[in-house]
Amino acid sequence: MRSWMHEAINRIEADFQRSADTHLFRLDLPGIEGVDLYLKDESTHPTGSLKHRLARSLFLYALCNGKLREGRPVIEASSGSTAVSEAYFARMLGLPFVAVMPKSTARSKIALIEFYGGRCHFVDSAPEMHDAAVALAAETGGHFMDQFMYAERATDWRGNNNIAESIFTQMAREPHPVPAAIVMSAGTGGTSATLGRYVRYRGYDTELVVVDPENSVFYDSYMTGDRTLRRACSSRIEGIGRPKVEPSFQHDVIDRMIQVPDAASVATIHWLEERIGRKAGASTGTNLWGALVVAREMMAAGRKGSIVTLMCDSGRRYLDTYYDPDWVARCLGDLGSYRGQLPGEDAGPI
C-alpha cells in the first residue's frame, strides 16, 4: 500500500513539474482609464480549466490522508470541469472514476470526462449530487473526493505555487503591482478561500471581491450570515454557484460580494470574444462583469490601480449552450441590455 501511494504522489508531482504556469494578460478596454484590468488564463492547463489546480490538490490531499487505494474507484460530485480534471488524474493513477452530475451538463464536458476514462452518473438537479455520490462510494467501496468539503483545506494557501502566489509574482513588474482588487466567482469556494488567506498572510492591501450568479445561495448567505440557506434549483452558469452553502465557502476572508445576472455573464463572454478572438466559459463572464463594476467604481472615485480576474475555462466546452443562439434565447432571453453596458458599446456604464 505505501509503495503504491509513493508512486502515485511521484506521478502527480512529475506531471506538475512538466507544466508551465498560466498566462496573465492585460485587457485594453475603451473607456476604462486609470485602471488596468488583467485576465489570468486558466484554460491553458492540461485539462483546460482552473479546476486542474484543484483536482491535483485534492488527489494529493486524499493520498496523503490514506483515502485512496489501488484499484478502488474515485467518486466526485461535479457539473463538469472538476470532473474532467479528476478523471485525468485518476487515469494517471490507474483508478476508476465516476462523476455525479446533473443531466443538463454540457455534452462537451461529458465527452471530455469519458475521453479521460471516466464514467458519468446522472441526477436530475444539482441538489441531488452529494447524496448520490455518497451512495455510489458506499456501493463500490470507493472514495468520495467531495470537492465542496475539502477544496479550501487541500490547497496550501501560504504559497507553494498556488494561484494567489502566481498572480502576485506575475504582477510584480506591472505599473500597479499590488492589485486594488481580485475578482473571483465561487463554485466550491476553495479558490476564493486561498486568495483571501494569501492576501492576509502577505499583508497586501487587496480587496477580494467574490461574484455570484443567479440561483446560488452564496451571495444571500454572505449578506445575511445565514449558512443554512438552500435553493431547489441549479445554477445556469456551469462550475459556479451552489444550491447550498458548501463547507469550503469561507465568508470571513471575503471583503465584498456582487450578484451578477446570468444574462450579463453570457453577454460579457460574447463581448470578450470580439476583443480577444477567443471563447471563454460563462463563469469568466461573471468574473469579468464584476471586475468591470469595480473598475467603474474606481474611476468614479478617481482611484488608479489594477484589477485581476480569471478566465476559468474555454468556451469551446459550451458551443451547445452559451454560444448557441437558440439556447440563449430560450434560457436567458435578449442579451442586448447587458451588451449595451459593456465598454465600447452604446448604452451607459454597468
Image (cartoon, rainbow, N blue to C red):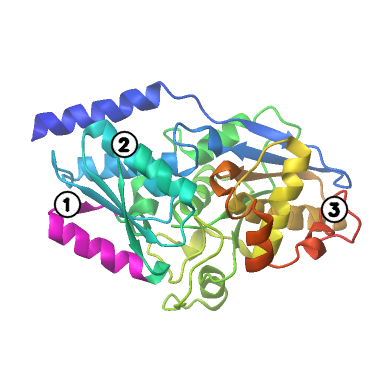
Task: Tell me the residue at 41%/62% (across/down).
Answer: 103
Disc 2 secondary structure class: helix
**Which numbered disc, 2 or 3, marks the residue that appears first in the sequence?**
2
Taking the view exactly as shown, the residue that stands out farthest to the left is 1
**Which numbered disc, 2 or 1, marks the residue that appears first in the sequence?**
2
**Residue in the foreground of this view, choosing between 232 and 62:** 232
Q: Nearer the viewer, mark 3 or mark 1?
A: 1
Q: Is residue 158 visible?
A: no
Cα distance in 3D space between marks 2 and 3: 44 Å
Cα distance in 3D space between marks 3 and 1: 52 Å
Task: Tell me the residue at 41%/78% (across/down).
Answer: 228
Within-10-Å neighbours for mark 3: few <14, some 14–19, many 20+: some
Disc 1 secondary structure class: loop
Q: Is residue 278 visible?
A: yes
Q: Which mark is residue 299?
A: 3
For the residues bearing labels 3 and 1, Cβ distance under 8 angstroms? no
Within-10-Å neighbours for mark 1: few <14, some 14–19, many 20+: many
Q: Which mark is residue 89?
A: 2
Question: Is 312 drawn above or below residue 148 in the view shown?
Answer: above
Describe residue 243's horizontal placement relative to residue 208 as left or right: left
Q: Which mark is residue 142?
A: 1
Given the image, on which type of amino acid does mark 3 rest? Met
Residue 337 x %, y %: 81, 65
Magenta region: which residues? 128-145
Task: Tell me the residue at 39%/22% (across/down).
Answer: 17
Question: Is 164 drawn above or below residue 211 in the view shown?
Answer: above
Question: Is 292 drawn above or below residue 155 in the view shown?
Answer: below
Residue 185 x %, y %: 56, 56
Cα distance in 3D space between marks 2 and 1: 15 Å
